[in-house]
Amino acid sequence: MSSVGWAEARTLAYTAGWSARPPAVEVPLAQADGMTLAAPLTTLTDLPAFPTSSVDGYAVRGAGPWRIAGSVLAGSVAPELAEGDCVEIATGAMVPADASAVVRVEDSTIGTDGRVSGEPRPVRDWRDPGDEAHQGEELLPAGTTVTPGVIGLAAACGHDSLRVTPSIPTAIVIFGDELLTAGPPERGRIRDALGPQLPGWLARLGGAVVPEFAPLGPIEDTLDAHVEAIRKALEGADLVCTTGGTMHGPVDHLHPALAALGARYIANTVGVRPGFPMLLASLTVGDRTKFIAGLPGNPQSAIVALTSLVEPLLAGLTGRPAPTAGRVTLGAEIPGRGDHTHLSLVRVEPDGLAYPLAHSGSAMLRGLARADGFAVIPPGTAGSAGDEVALLRLPILPGTRP
């Protein structure tokens, strides 16, 4: 199969994932974090469900001073109020239906006769039913990623569980006799830098990395070992991400292994630099479609492939919208890469401009460790300072920018 354009490859990956997404499941709220809403989130009640005090103070009826007729705390039913009466009220407590105002505790005084005096503020200090949402209202669409905030909202709406598309069981298979898994590089062998980082990237993209395969390897450079490793990973995962072996050299066995397994290419090499020799394939296991993403062995190229193919594939598999790029203005020149799309590592500085990073060769990780994402330079073009270009952000957690 000939190389496909970068944008087309992303579309192909998303479409393949969407067509193979697993059925929705119902899970308890505590288990839904990171999954994807398979149905819109609607509220089972008005929010709030009853008039709710926003402050500590006194719920009053009529003109003051008011006689204290009791108190109402959060979690209790508000009493009825007679004209000229008030009840002490706590933040979050139910406001009596016949209250005319809530007077804040800091705006009130209690006289020697035991009556409360004070002035309500111009803006009423309680929330009416439905201030935030009305019963049956759609709050979030299907395809929304479930976050702790979404879980909290669902609980406030009265839900005990959510209908979701689950995260995708994912395996990582590391190829290469030359790789070390501990200590510094030595005697012609290099340290595996992909096995330790890929689980974190995949978790941010919707993949649930199976502990047994996080990662598997390094696998020796023989065809039989490649076939056996992929086959084993497919037993426990719906997506297998391999590293290395995507070319056709003497120890590159991925393509023959895919042929032996009966896999079908979705994209075989992509017109992007770095990361050109990436691939995505599918195969049928029982009644399920499973996927193999071949990431190049060079670390930055592998992350380009992850962003280019695996991110849209997982978005489709989890029922999320297709990922889209933002926009950013360049602060410096970025060269083009001829007929290929150039994904250039950039950092967005406090001036709001994106600057290319040094140490961003395909085998380097120093630039990646400081990057906010990739500036997308289309084929046949170059980027100049002041140009607005697409920005493909890396899925970095808030507060972790180096």
Image (cartoon, rainbow, N blue to C red):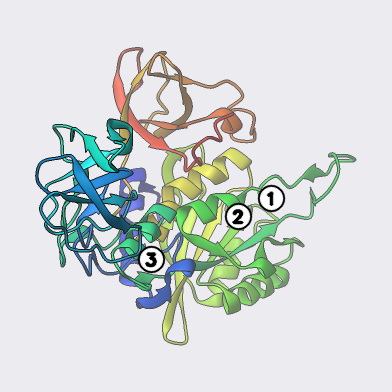
User: Can residue 380 be seen here?
Assistant: no
Q: Residue furthest bottom?
A: 286
The crowding category of the residue bearing disc 3, from other C-alpha atoms within 10 Å (few below 14, some 14 to 19, many at least 20), is many
Residue that numbered label 1 is attached to? 196
Tell me which residue sits at (48%, 24%) in the image.
Answer: 347
User: Can residue 130 be seen here?
Assistant: yes
Percent from the top left, x then y, of residue 393? 42, 37
Mark 2–mark 3 distance (CA, rounded to whole Å) = 17 Å
Left/right of residue 378 with respect to residue 175 in the rendered view: left
Say what amino acid the circle numbered 3 marks.
Leu
Are dots 1 and 2 in contact, CB under 8 Å?
Answer: yes
Marks 3 and 1, the one that precedes in the sequence = 1
* Location of residue 246 by image quarter: bottom right
Percent from the top left, x then y, of residue 119? 18, 32
Q: Which of 240 and 154 is in front in this view?
A: 154
Left/right of residue 212 with respect to residue 296 in the rendered view: right
Up/down of 287 relative to 53, above or below: below
In the structure shown, which secondary structural element does the residue marked by tag 3 occupy?
helix
Q: Which mark is residue 317?
A: 3
Tell me which residue sits at (64%, 34%) in the image.
Answer: 365
Up/down of 72 relative to 340, above or below: below
Say what amino acid the circle numbered 2 marks.
Pro
Percent from the top left, x then y, of residue 162? 35, 71
In the structure shown, which secondary structural element does the residue marked by tag 2 occupy?
helix
Q: Nearer the viewer, residue 206 or 375?
A: 206
Up/down of 73 relative to 389, above or below: below
